[in-house]
Amino acid sequence: MSKVQPRTLSGFMELLPPQQAQFERMAAILRETYSLYGFTPLDTPLIESSEVLLAKGGGETEKQIYRFMKGDTDLSLRFDLTVPLAKYVAQNYGQLTFPFRRFQIGKVYRGERAQRGRFREFYQADIDVIGDGKLDISNEAEIPAIIYQAFSKMGLRRFQIRVNNRKILNGFYAMLGLTDKSGDIMRTVDKLDKIGGEKVAALLTGEDIGLTQDQADEILKFIAIKGCNGEVLAALEGYRGRHALFDTGLDELRTVTKYLAAFGVPESHFAVDLTIARGLDYYTGTVYETTMLDHPEIGSICSGGRYDNLAEYYTDKQLPGVGISIGLTRLFFVLEDQGYLNQNLNTAPADVLILPMTEDLSPAISLATTMRDAGIRTQIHGEQKKFKQKISYADKLAIPYVVFLGEDEIRAGVAAVKDLRTGEQVKLPSVEAVAHIRRGLEQLNRGTPIRDRES
Amino acid sequence: MSKVQPRTLSGFMELLPPQQAQFERMAAILRETYSLYGFTPLDTPLIESSEVLLAKGGGETEKQIYRFMKGDTDLSLRFDLTVPLAKYVAQNYGQLTFPFRRFQIGKVYRGERAQRGRFREFYQADIDVIGDGKLDISNEAEIPAIIYQAFSKMGLRRFQIRVNNRKILNGFYAMLGLTDKSGDIMRTVDKLDKIGGEKVAALLTGEDIGLTQDQADEILKFIAIKGCNGEVLAALEGYRGRHALFDTGLDELRTVTKYLAAFGVPESHFAVDLTIARGLDYYTGTVYETTMLDHPEIGSICSGGRYDNLAEYYTDKQLPGVGISIGLTRLFFVLEDQGYLNQNLNTAPADVLILPMTEDLSPAISLATTMRDAGIRTQIHGEQKKFKQKISYADKLAIPYVVFLGEDEIRAGVAAVKDLRTGEQVKLPSVEAVAHIRRGLEQLNRGTPIRDRES
């Protein structure tokens, strides 16, 4: 028979079992953390009607969308989890209770140009809180606090959540009479890290944007405000009283900063940063980006912000919200690429491999049942293979414990438990064998999926 | 602004939060159970190259496939999890360790005609064990034992895993000299439940198949063999010695039956049933179907079997395996539709809602942190709303506990914990409040997602 070459499309991540186990641990930590903060899991379809999904229309994303006909239905694959959430909330408005707190971890699709570290199918892990008409500012502090918890539980240490407020930016540009140009200005200022202050100034005073030198200087001075959070807030106070929107934004930023501390986020892990704007037009208040301190070049690993109108394309209801999104597939790729994954993590498919040394497998099956009832992941090696091959199977999979069960052990009512890392072997009755293995696993499973330098 | 009507495509399941929570519990039980038996999680792309995905070609399924071009690439959405597994194993053969045990719970796509209870996007929850060249018969007993465990943990009681062996069927037809016609015969015999014995006999002796009356009688007599497993096996012994393949099949069936008992599956929950054939040609040994005793009309909720050649379209390697698949979306639909879901299950997004009664939220945040550290899912209601509205929020979401935190409580170092089901309220220091709530939750979370009659 002629064969088809088995292959996976480029831009689609498909992991080998140990890496998949690492990925699952990270996803599980996100699910647990999001749940602890009272978010409910949602699962929306991968495919939506194009009319619904592209209601907002236009923009950069549209070219990247996987869009196709099935029969005479125009379909698209979701490209983020926010538009499906907007649809869901508008559609089920009467059956939901607000503030509506949901998390979703799911794949999204963008037909980007294939290149290393860019994915066409990737997981996003989102949380959002949606209010009905109103939403309290405290949510804008809780959201980054959840991210701090999640990353910390994963073992990430050297990261920083950078916080700004769009009202401060918009208020500031209004002070200068530059509201109309604020979009262009922010996009230019966004390039500061890449091209430097001089080139930004040149672009700002250039033909396209056309600011005066004074205006450009004012802007560069403003975004150059640096220091610890207290210093930045103090500097911002110098602008107070010149524009109401700015003042509101400054009050919000003060509140968010105060509550972030109350939520247990140390100051080392969040920074007021006036250069953060987020490209999307719909952010109206607090905005977030998260950077790895030792890898600023990879950009933000978790971003989001406050918006006033989640579902304006579907409903007249005013649905303000705040949300944040982790690009989980890309984050995982970067962590693996940069050597952050904890190689000592137990990624074996089982904790115990039972090697039956008798023809009849029944005693092995019975012991396996005892182990599984105690929460120990157990395989029975029932194949007709040589002893050496069976041990090699456990070695290759890094299964931590092997249990030998021969005539002697069965007669004596014990199991021979071998720790494959230390080579230590003990004969124990099954109840004690279970306790022995559980103690070892507790030690072994203590590690986090990520190993970072100390923060 | 003109609005787009928010809607979800027909044939795509999208659940409200309480139902989603039920679904997640069922999926979590599957993940846990599969893991306890030493299966490793896999996650393959939703999209594959059409050439790869449709290597096998043809068949009923092809018309249903979501297939489309992106640029000049011919793509298809996966329609099951078996073909992607075959691709994965062939592609990563050198890096896998065999027997390779994997589970995958993921969405698949089939453009079926939309009708109630039929889905175009649905979850499959699969386990497979793949051998390299050989695979021991004991795996064919372990697979249905895992399903028994999983369904039992979900709370399903009145179901039966029906087991047959293709070698018995093929051997039997060979005895009658009907090997060439066995496909047609089995497809006809499959209709027995629907159309009855007489019509089956008429079809068998009709023009298309053309059996003699004697042959048709022999077949009907064979598939009429009923009784407890011991009786069926005894009846089958009557055919021993007439065909080697039959005899092998009978030996395998005896072994599987014996080990199923060893794996703890009670005889009430598995039945040797000679009418089970499974349509797919690639099954070569043990085959399974699972029926709900009180709802035979919905057909098999979990099916699979033994195959000799998982990846023959991709590789010359002989990769025999055994697998089983739960159609999770359809199962969930049926369970909900038939009133099997446990309405007392805790499906609230949080276990505790903290109502801060002071301007400053810091004490509430601090208490929430204590709760979350203890594994209690906690929300803070920080909105500017009336007390009654806040209580109504907890009521609507069925959050079991509300904690009031006012000046008095803060000063006294206590929290007022109210059980919303009983109305009972107690004032306790936070450590004791945590213990009190955990005791209550332990009780509350004891239930299974399914409530069935006793088996």
Image (cartoon, coloured by chain):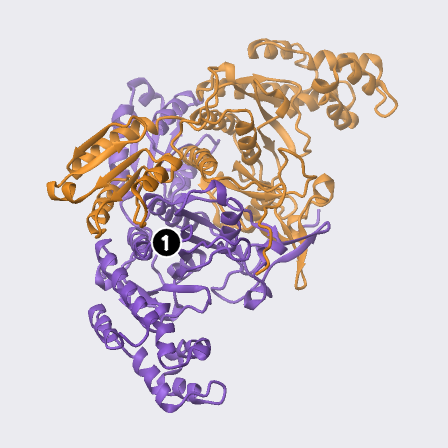
Chain colours: A orange, B purple
**Disc 1 residue type (three-letter):** Leu
Q: x and y percent of residue A295 in the render?
A: 59, 20
Is A251 left, or right, of A413 in this rendering? right
* Rendering quarter of residue B332: bottom left
Q: Which residue is tagged 1?
A: B135
Q: Position of residue A141 (x, y in %)?
A: 51, 25
- Does residue B53 lie above or below A450 as drawn? below
Q: Nearer the viewer, residue B438 or B364?
A: B438
Q: Identify the residue at horizontal 39%, vertical 68% (top origin).
A: B299
Q: Who is closer to the viewer here, B364 or A297?
A: A297
The answer to whether residue B76 shows anywhere in this view is no
How many discs mark residues in the rendered view? 1
Where residue A71 sits in the image (x, y, percent)? 66, 64
Query: Residue B300 lies in what quarter of the image?
Result: bottom left
Q: Chain of mark 1?
A: B
In the image, residue A195 above or below residue B110? above
Taking depth in this image into account, of B219 and B157 the one nearest to the observer is B219
Quadrant (top left, top right, bottom left, bottom right) of the N terminus of chain A: bottom right
Residue B338 in view of the camera:
yes
